[in-house]
C-alpha cells in the first residue's frame, strides 16, 4: 500500500492543537505561564469539547529545568479572576522533556499518551521551539496509542473498534473511575477525529495495514504482536499501583487542595464550607470535620 508521509500526522496534530478556545481560557493560561520556566500550556478535558467555562478547567503546564525528583506530575488548583468571572483551574505540572518521553511510550506510565491522543489545545508556547516540541510529543502519543490499539483491538474492524478496545483497557489499567460507556462518549464527541487519526498514526509508526472502506486490518507480524502485548501487560500490571501512589502523594502535596475541596463540596452538596487556615494547610486532617459539617447541615 502507499505510505502516507509522516508529516501528514504532524500536520494533523498541529491543526488540532490550534483549536479555538474561549478568551477566558487563554487568560488563565497566560497567568499560569507567568513563571519564566514555563515552556507551554495545554488545555484539555470536557470543557475544551463544550466551550463552557463553569466547573474546573484542566491544564497541563510544561516546564524547563532539571529532571523531576520522584513522581510527577505535581497537581495544583487555582482560582483566577477574569473580568467579572472567577475561573477555576486544575493544573498538572511536568517537565516538557518528561512529557515527551512519556508520550513516546518508553515509560511504564500510560496517562500522558492516553490523554493526549484525545483533543487538546496548545494555549501558550514560549516560542517556536516549544511549540514544535509539544506538537512532536502529541504526535508521538498518537503513534504510541495506535500501536497498542492495533495489538489490543480486533483482527479487523473500524477505527472506532480499535479506539474502543484501547480506552477500555487503559481505564482498567489506570484505576480510573469512569461511568460505563465513557469510551463511547469520547468517540461520539471526536467528530471524525479518531477515524482520521488512526491510519495516520499507523503510517507514521510503521504499522502496515489494509483498508477496505471503513474496515481496517493492521498487519502486525506475530513477533510485533507479542512485543506489543508483552509491553501492555507490564503497563497493566503496574498501572494501578502507580496511580494509587500518585493519589496518596497528591493528598499531601496538592497545592490549593483545601480551596478545591471546599468548592467541590459546595457544588455537589450545596453546603458552603468556610476555608479556614487549618483547612487550607491541612486538607486531609480537616476532611472528617468537613464531612461532619455536611452531614449535620443536610441532616
Image (cartoon, rainbow, N blue to C red):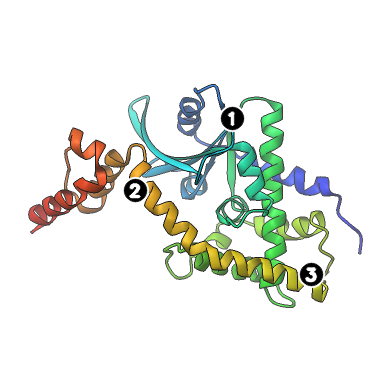
Figure quadrant of the C terminus: bottom left
Q: Quadrant of residue 192?
A: bottom right
Crowding near pointer 1: few (<14 within 10 Å), some, many (20+)?
few
Q: Which mark is residue 65?
A: 1
Q: Quadrant of residue 207?
A: bottom right
Q: Which mark is residue 224?
A: 3
- CB within 8 Å, label 1 to label 2: no
Residue beneath the point at 68% across and 65% down = 148
Q: Secondary structure at mark 3?
A: helix
Q: Position of residue 12 (x, y in %)?
A: 73, 46
Residue 159 appears in view: no
Where is mark 2, residue-wise? 251
- Left/right of residue 96 with respect to residue 87 in the rendered view: right
Distance from disc 1 to disc 2, alpha carbons, whole Å, reads 25 Å
Crowding near pointer 2: few (<14 within 10 Å), some, many (20+)?
some
Vertically, is 166 above or below 95? below
Q: Secondary structure at mark 1?
A: loop
Amino acid at each position: 500500500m502507499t505510505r502516507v508521509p509522516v508529516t501528514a500526522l504532524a500536520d494533523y496534530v498541529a491543526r488540532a492543537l490550534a483549536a479555538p478556545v474561549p478568551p477566558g481560557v487563554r487568560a488563565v493560561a497566560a497567568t499560569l505561564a507567568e513563571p519564566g520556566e514555563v515552556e507551554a500550556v495545554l488545555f484539555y478535558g470536557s470543557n475544551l469539547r463544550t466551550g463552557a467555562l463553569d466547573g474546573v478547567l484542566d491544564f497541563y503546564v510544561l516546564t524547563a529545568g532539571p529532571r523531576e525528583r520522584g513522581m510527577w506530575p505535581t497537581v495544583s488548583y487555582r482560582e483566577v479572576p477574569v473580568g467579572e468571572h472567577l475561573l477555576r483551574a486544575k493544573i498538572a505540572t511536568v517537565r516538557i522533556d518528561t512529557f515527551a518521553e512519556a508520550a513516546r511510550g518508553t515509560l511504564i506510565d500510560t496517562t500522558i499518551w492516553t490523554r493526549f491522543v484525545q483533543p487538546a489545545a496548545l494555549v501558550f508556547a514560549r516560542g517556536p521551539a516549544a511549540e514544535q516540541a509539544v506538537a512532536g510529543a502529541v504526535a508521538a502519543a498518537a503513534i504510541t496509542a495506535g500501536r497498542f490499539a492495533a495489538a489490543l483491538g480486533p483482527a479487523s474492524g473500524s477505527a472506532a473498534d480499535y479506539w474502543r478496545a484501547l480506552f477500555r483497557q487503559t481505564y482498567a489499567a489506570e484505576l480510573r473511575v469512569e461511568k460505563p460507556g465513557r469510551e463511547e462518549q469520547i468517540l461520539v464527541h471526536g467528530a471524525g477525529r479518531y477515524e482520521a487519526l488512526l491510519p495516520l498514526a499507523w503510517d507514521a509508526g510503521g504499522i502496515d495495514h489494509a483498508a477496505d472502506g471503513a474496515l481496517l486490518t493492521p498487519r502486525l507480524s506475530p513477533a510485533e504482536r507479542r512485543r506489543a502485548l508483552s509491553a501492555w501487560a507490564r503497563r497493566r500490571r503496574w498501572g494501578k499501583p502507580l496511580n494509587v501512589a500518585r493519589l496518596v502523594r497528591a493528598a499531601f502535596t496538592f497545592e490549593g487542595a483545601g480551596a478545591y475541596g471546599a468548592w467541590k463540596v459546595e457544588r455537589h452538596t450545596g453546603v458552603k464550607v468556610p476555608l479556614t487556615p487549618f483547612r487550607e494547610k491541612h486538607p486531609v486532617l480537616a476532611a472528617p470535620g468537613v464531612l461532619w459539617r455536611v452531614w449535620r447541615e443536610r441532616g
